[in-house]
Image (cartoon, rainbow, N blue to C red):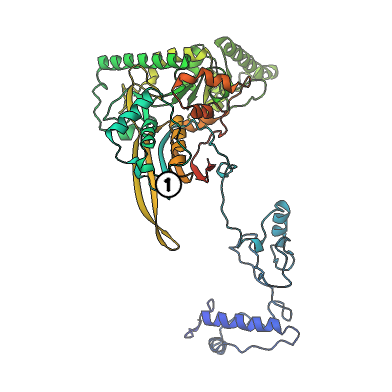
């Protein structure tokens, strides 16, 4: 039976004892040439030896090897590149631009470190870490090169938060005359060009009227007690709201009839280039219609996202030719192609022949009756697995061009699944959003609110001013607001942008058949109701891909942005 000695535990050493041992080992490294001296044993250890307890050998001054210098033990929780840091002023230390010699500080895991260095030779050395803060961004978070204009962003924003060192008091409490003048400027599409810098924005009537003009958008249907954007995932916000049409079939037909008239009116304006673009927001997907000449395309285009296999199948059955721009070709079959019903029938016939050939070898062996063949439904589901996997994802975005957009118009008007049959959105037509007026539309205003806060700085506290914009913020509105703030805030502000995620994929670069003449495009779209500079930006080819702008900083009239 083991005896208990007060103050001693065989598997534990008190912190003071550990510190004492480390100090003695450090002294022994300095006197490595001298013969090792026998260290005095702690009192608790001597008591344990006197009691006859089995103990591990006491560590000698020379380390594990006895007489040689003690090797530094490796921290098992450290990263592979966690090396002892060399003092900056050490004369024998490695230069900052040269990698450290690996042999001196490597331990039993040195092979892993050497392989790591060979694989990533450009890795930052230890001496560089204190001077270079570690900030990791994804590939899309890397700041763009400095430019005087932002890239075009076709996603719908739900919130904008502008911050600046100069106040936004000019955006509050517009006078009745200024509000009326701003609405007239919007309805008449009056072009207003502000100076580069406004000395006193609060006294600038032109600035306040232009700000009011930038907040206007057009909506159908308009139900003030229901949030009609966003529609995807809005069931929770609509729960408990009054919806008299949900159980009234007659009222649903009236709402859909009015919506069809408004939708057709918008498309006709788009076709005649009196409307640059508009959105159709359903409870399952969003459609962006763009006029010919925008985003580098010479035809009317429509982007639908996200889509499902059922929706694509229904469009295919209606004879709508469309493509999946984010799905590349695989093998002999082009996944982007969903052309006419004839092409689809040919692909189906080829797949049936492949099925018959795949089981012909069973008949040759004479075991076709003994082995159970998979049924036709299983084979079909397995072949359509890749098509189902991309449902509700950005990769499922569908592109419709040219005359097929008119067929898409009729398809959406007559589509039964366009309107929810149950839930809080049951019987409610999709939301139409447009920058210009159309038949049955209601003028709406984005909500603006300015806030002043105190933020901590090196010398105490300083004022931080912010301007918050909420609502369905369309691309033209974002560009108008940034142009306006460039003048009012003397070319220095920052912005946080909150996009409606299903619409971020509208920034993909579409295949362009020919390069358009920008002067001709601007001439044809002169009467679309947009500022010439805004129209010039929307005519550019999108560069953001599946992402959208999220952070914008302007300094000295130069933009830096992250997506």
Q: Position of residue 191 (x, y in %)?
A: 44, 27
Left or right of 167: which side holds 124? right
Q: Secondary structure at mark 1?
A: strand
Residue that mark 1 sits on: 163
Quadrant of res 33: bottom right
Which residue lies at the image location 65% right of the left edge and 19% below the top edge? 358
Tell which of 391 and 154 is nearer to you.
154
Q: For label 1, count other residues whose C-alpha is less than 10 Å away and answer few (under 14), some (14-19) or many (20+).
A: many
Q: Position of residue 267 (x, y in %)?
A: 43, 16
Which residue lies at the image location 50% right of the left edge and 42% below the top edge? 552
| 330 vs 74: above or below | above
Residue 297 seen in the figure: no
Which residue lies at the image location 55% right of the left edge and 11% below the top edge? 341
Quadrant of res 477: top left
In this view, the residue farthest toward the top is 342
Residue 5 seen in the figure: yes
């Amino acid at each position: 039976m083991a005896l208990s000695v007060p103050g001693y535990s065989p598997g534990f050493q008190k912190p003071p004892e550990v510190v004492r041992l480390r100090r003695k080992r450090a002294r022994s490294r300095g006197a490595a040439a001298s013969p090792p001296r026998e260290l005095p044993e702690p009192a608790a250890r001597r008591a344990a030896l006197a009691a006859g307890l089995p103990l591990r050998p006491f560590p000698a001054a020379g380390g594990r090897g006895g007489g040689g210098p003690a090797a530094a033990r490796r921290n098992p929780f450290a990263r592979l590149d966690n090396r002892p840091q060399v003092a900056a002023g050490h004369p024998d230390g490695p230069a900052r631009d040269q990698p450290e010699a690996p042999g001196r500080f490597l331990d039993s895991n040195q092979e892993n470190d050497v392989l790591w260095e060979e694989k990533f030779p450009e890795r930052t050395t230890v001496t560089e870490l204190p001077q270079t803060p570690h900030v990791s961004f994804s590939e899309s978070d890397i700041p763009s090169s400095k430019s005087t204009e932002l890239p075009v962003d076709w996603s719908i924003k739900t919130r904008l938060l502008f911050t600046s060192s100069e106040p936004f008091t000019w955006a509050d409490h517009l006078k009745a005359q200024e509000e009326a003048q701003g609405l007239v400027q919007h309805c008449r599409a009056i072009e207003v060009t502000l100076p580069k810098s406004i000395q006193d924005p609060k006294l600038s009537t032109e600035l306040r009227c232009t700000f009011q003009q930038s907040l206007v958008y057009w909506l159908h249907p308009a139900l003030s007690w229901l949030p009609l954007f966003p529609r995807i995932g809005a069931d929770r916000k609509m729960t408990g709201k009054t919806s008299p049409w949900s159980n009234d079939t007659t009222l649903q037909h009236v709402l859909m009839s009015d919506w069809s008239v408004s939708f057709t009116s918008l498309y006709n304006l788009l076709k005649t280039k009196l409307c640059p673009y508009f959105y159709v927001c359903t409870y399952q997907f969003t459609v962006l219609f763009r006029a010919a000449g925008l985003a580098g395309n010479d035809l009317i285009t429509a982007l639908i996202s996200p889509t499902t296999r059922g929706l694509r199948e229904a469009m295919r059955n209606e004879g709508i030719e469309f493509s999946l721009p984010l799905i590349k070709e695989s093998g002999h079959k082009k996944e982007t192609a969903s052309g006419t019903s004839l092409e689809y029938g040919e692909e189906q016939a080829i797949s049936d022949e492949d099925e018959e050939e795949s089981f012909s070898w069973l008949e040759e062996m004479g075991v076709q009756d003994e082995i159970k063949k998979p049924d036709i439904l299983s084979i079909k589901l397995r072949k359509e697995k890749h098509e189902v996997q991309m449902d509700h994802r950005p990769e499922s975005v569908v592109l419709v061009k040219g005359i097929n957009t008119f067929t898409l118009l009729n398809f959406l008007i007559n589509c039964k699944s366009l309107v929810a049959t149950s839930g809080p959105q049951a019987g409610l037509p999709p939301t139409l959003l447009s920058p210009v007026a159309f038949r049955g539309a209601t003028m709406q205003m984005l909500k603006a609110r300015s806030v002043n806060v105190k933020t901590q700085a090196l010398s105490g506290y300083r004022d931080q001013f912010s301007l918050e914009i909420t609502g369905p913020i369309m691309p033209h509105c974002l560009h108008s607001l940034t142009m306006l703030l460039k003048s009012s805030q003397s070319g220095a502000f920052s912005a946080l942008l909150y996009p409606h995620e299903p619409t971020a994929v509208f920034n993909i670069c579409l295949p362009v058949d020919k390069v358009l003449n920008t002067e001709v495009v601007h001439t044809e779209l002169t009467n679309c109701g947009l500022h010439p500079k805004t129209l010039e930006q929307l005519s550019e080819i999108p560069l953001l891909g599946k992402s959208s702008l999220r952070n914008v900083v302007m300094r000295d009239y130069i933009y830096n942005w992250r997506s």
